[in-house]
Amino acid sequence: MPNPCRRAALGRHHRRHHRRRRSDVRERSVARPAGDSALRGPDGLRLRAARRAGPAPSNRRCPVSQPTVRSGRARIRARAALRRGAGLLAAALLLSAAASGGAGASVAVPQDTAFWVEPDSSAARQAAAWRRGGYFAQAWLMDRIAGRAQAVWLHDKSPGPRIRAVAEAAAWTGRTPVFVAYFIPHRDCGEYSRGGAAGAAEYRRWIEEVAAAIGDRAAYVVVEPDAVAQEVAGCARADAGERYALLAHAVERLKARPNAKVYLDAGNAGWIPDERRLVTPLRQAGIAKADGFALNVSNYHTNAVSSAYGHRLATRVGGAKHFVVDSSRNGNGPYTGDAKAWCNPPGRALGTPPTTRTGDPALDAYLWIKRPGESDGTCRGGPRAGQWWPQYALGLASRAKGQRSGAGGADEGRRP
């Protein structure tokens, strides 16, 4: 005789399944771009949807297993887990709500430092959308980005609320956030990321707001990607003296925060191949008061090339300066196909996950300063600079070598 509980459960299962299928149709524009062509990522990568299994049905009228009585030790562990979960939830809520020193004294970088992972990043939302649509393999690949620490770029006129929300969220998890100050006047030589402050006065006010919002919390800050190298290359539409003075002011004010690590951007190994050309500009821009400099931001040069360049530059600058390297997209090295090798090049891959375990005492960290999956600009079919591009992100993740999905892997340093 058929089991009535099973029959009722199956009926509810089928009704729920059909409701979810109808919902999937409505969500498909979110889960993946419309059209069959969108199912093919960069370089012909094919997206395959897995058939979804409906949720296990329940039936209140049928017998259910009774909860097991926990021991006192188990109850203590459960309460601790709840408290940790509440902390993470509070951090996420803070982020959601905010979406709307010593002169030159360096802060030692602990080798077990771990960096903050944003719980609601574009990659995390994309992975969730693909899971809802049944694209489980693609969601798993996207977790390679979503589960890693990425820098938070500060480029709007009022960065304070965002900084405080991120800092609070990071404090809940016991990790350190990475910020990028990106508001220098005449930013990006008028290219894809043009903008910034209207003038020197606005920029100084902006830096004061950034420093005040960081306060006494631990943070890494990368100061103005491209600003020095653009002056050296001769493309900046600004007075060089004023720009260097603003950068020096930014370094000084940020280093006044007792727990901030500050790195002045110094371009990349392919932009200014002769590192001697950077020495005087970096000194004028305040490198003496910074912890060091940042290399390869938003670029693709390998760790080996960037590290060798960093050591040469550190020797010439003097002061035993350290450096950090952006390894977010350098897994396959630079593209050599055309002049705009830096703008959404094909065939690239995720690089070394963020870590302070570099094996090099002068190299403080590999960081994901550029957020993988955000466009370099309107080239090669990409959206505007900084906009999320899921197909490109998926290509980067699919080509990553030896990486697993999820946050806090063995390759990241941890706090005790």
Image (cartoon, helix red, strand yellow):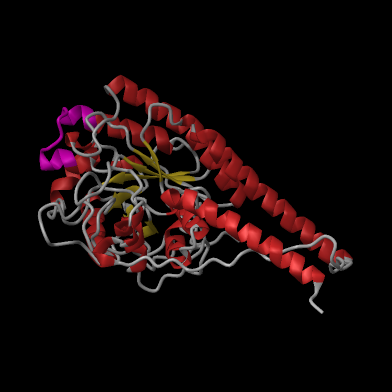
Q: Nearer the viewer, residue 331 or 391?
A: 391
Q: Nearer the viewer, residue 179 or 364?
A: 179
Let me know if residue 78 is in the magenta part: no
Write the start and end of the magenta stretch as one range.
Answer: 230-243
Residue drawn at (58%, 58%), measured in percent from left and top?
A: 18
Give the farthest residue toward the bottom.
1
Coordinates of residue 129 in the picture (x, y in percent): 48, 54
Residue drawn at (17%, 35%), measured in percent from left and top?
A: 189
Left or right for 153, reference 65:
left
Residue 2 visible in the displayed image? yes
Left or right for 186, reference 288:
left
Q: Nearer the viewer, residue 323 or 141?
A: 141
Residue 216 visible in the displayed image? no
Coordinates of residue 328 in the picture (x, y in percent): 34, 58
Coordinates of residue 351 in the picture (x, y in percent): 34, 64
Up-down relation of residue 371 to residue 353 (above or below): above
Coordinates of residue 324 in the picture (x, y in percent): 34, 55
Q: Quadrant of the C terminus?
A: bottom right
